[in-house]
Amino acid sequence: MRFITDTPTPTHVVVQISDTHIVPDGELYHGLVDTLANVAGAFDQIERSGLDVAAILLTGDLADTGDVASYRRLRAYVEKRASGLGLPVLYAMGNHDSRGPFREGLLDAEPTTEPYDYVYWAGDLRVIVLDSTEPGEVIGLLDDAQLDWLAAELATPAPAGTVLALHHPPLPSPIGMLNALVLAEPERLAKVIAGTDVKIVLCGHSHHASGGALAGVPVWVSGASAYSARTVGPAGGYAGVTGGQFTRVDVYPDQAVATAVPSQVGEMIYELTPEMLAKYAAEFEAGANTTPDDLENLAKA
């Protein structure tokens, strides 16, 4: 049996948490879900992982009703956990969010209502956040000024490339009703990012994980932190079920890879420690006839 020994290493890791739908303290989302606990589950895994994370990116629908109290509750928790890990937190607008309370509760800024678009540099990796919301609308919209601003920014490549984030996916969903609620006129965004250094477009909104491409650029729709949408049935309908997700994004020199991660860890079947893996590697290098089953047996020993 052969292994690839020269394995790739990401230059940057970005953690995406989307659609947190935080409610005021003492309430449960739809009377069932502690949405802040799902965010906590993501941070618990990040902390245990030992990953060198470049940034935590929250891609919209952060407060379920766009109220200041919920933004402050989210911020108090997220920034305390992120500060303990030395990580920056980046916020993006979603259709459940409200620009004035969003700025007041998350940014300590004046509660103005212009789109919240910005650039963040994680070392030599550029993260561009676009506000795809329009007050009073559920669908995603990007105006000419935003696309012109994006084109001007992308005219100068970033040394490690660019991650572009917005709430509304420029992709169809397997859930029929959601296709009336995604980004309108995605071809306009495609024209801007074609041929640029954008390595991946990160979105949320749909509450299910899926991937596609726009102008040859990978697009990732993160599963939601608050709850998950069923993508197979019910026929012609929509169902949300408990259980959230977040996303690990590994950026490499020539590509980016997004991986869906459950917010809550399931029951352990087996676990391989670094010491076990080192022992297995040593036996393999010594010419032992090892198989993948040997790894499982090693874990159970």
Image (cartoon, helix red, strand yellow):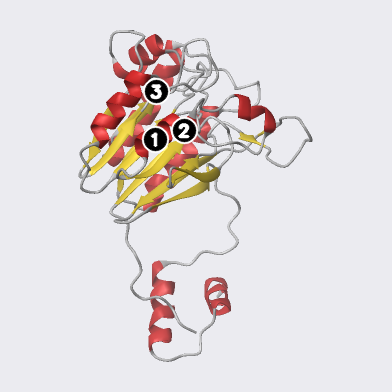
Mark 3 is surrounded, within 10 Å at the Cα level, by few (under 14), some (14 to 19) or many (20 or more) other residues, namely: many
Q: Position of residue 276 (x, y in %)?
A: 44, 73
Cα–Cα gap, marks 1 and 2: 6 Å
Q: Is residue 202 above or below residue 177?
A: below
Read off the residue under disc 3.
131
Answer above or below: position of 1 versus 103: below
Residue 99 on image: x %, y %? 40, 13
Residue 265 in picture, x, y percent from top left: 55, 48
Query: Secondary structure beneath disc 2?
Result: helix
CB atoms of marks 2 and 3 within 8 Å: no
Q: Quadrant of residue 230 in the image?
A: top right
- In this orientation, which residue lies closer to the viewer: 122 or 147? 147
Depth check, front residue: 19 or 256: 256
Q: Nearer the viewer, mark 2 or mark 3?
A: 2
Q: Which residue, given by chain and number where applicable, does mark 2 sit on?
A: 187
Q: Are marks 1 and 2 in contact (CB under 8 Å)?
A: yes
Q: Residue 272, image x and y in percent?
A: 48, 67
Mark 2 is on which residue type? Glu
User: Residue under circle 1?
Assistant: 191
